[in-house]
Image (tube, rainbow, N blue to C red):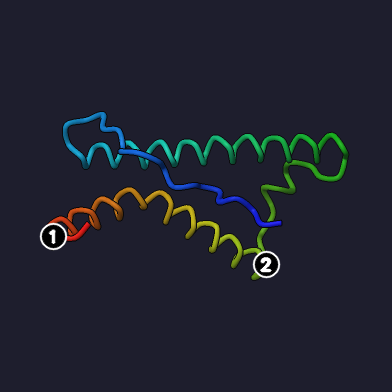
Amino acid sequence: MSQPDAYPPPQGHRPYFFDDPAIDQLHTALLAVTQELSVARERIDTLERLLEQSGHLQRAAIDAYRPDAVADAARTVQRETLVARVLKPFVDYRTSLFNRKRGTS
């Protein structure tokens, strides 16, 4: 069974909240980062609480953890994916401007 796309493409026209499209792009990026951070913090808090309650791990052990090469590589991929998602509105906007100047859509 295939997984649905985590972030399906939006339908319709993009709403604009500010006069300057660049400010709209910053606003969109800020909201995406805030959403990601909020979800991550909740999940981290849940994991730490469950681990501590079960007696399997103390929170101090989390602070002392140093990732191995495999974990570090996985984190790099996750970080790059997040950065690409955050920068997507800027890239899309620049692409749109470039295409309009060239006369393509």
Residue 99 rendering spot, x and y as whole percentages = 19, 59
Left or right of 26 on screen, residue 103: left
Report which residue position mark 2 lands on. Answer: 68
**Element at label 1:** loop
Work out which quarter of the rendered image holds the C terminus and state it.
bottom left
Residue 34 rendering spot, x and y as whole percentages = 46, 36
Q: If you read the primary sequence from the N terminus, does the residue marked by circle 1 or circle 2 appear first? A: 2
Report which residue position mark 1 lands on. Answer: 103
Tell me the crowding category of disc 2: few under 14, some 14 to 19, or many 20 or more residues within 10 angstroms, Cα based. few
Q: Amino acid at mark 1?
A: Gly
Task: Answer with the quarter of the image where residue 104 lies.
Answer: bottom left
Query: Which residue ends up furthest to the top in the rendered image?
Result: 17
Residue 44 rendering spot, x and y as whole percentages = 66, 40
Q: Which mark is on residue 31?
A: none
Q: Amino acid at mark 2?
A: Asp
Task: Answer with the quarter of the image where residue 41 lies.
Answer: top right
In the image, residue 15 above or below residue 69: above
Question: Camera-side residue: 73 or 35?
Answer: 35
Task: Answer with the quarter of the image where residue 50 lies.
Answer: top right
**Element at label 2:** loop
Q: Cβ–Cβ below 8 Å for labels 1 and 2?
A: no
> What number of labels is visible?
2
Give me the residue at 71% from left, 35% from top: 46
Work out which quarter of the rendered image holds the N terminus and state it.
bottom right
Residue 100 rendering spot, x and y as whole percentages = 15, 55
In space, the residues marked 1 and 2 are separated at their CA atoms by 50 Å
Query: Which residue ends up furthest to the bottom in the rendered image?
Result: 69
Give me the residue at 20% from left, 40% from top: 21
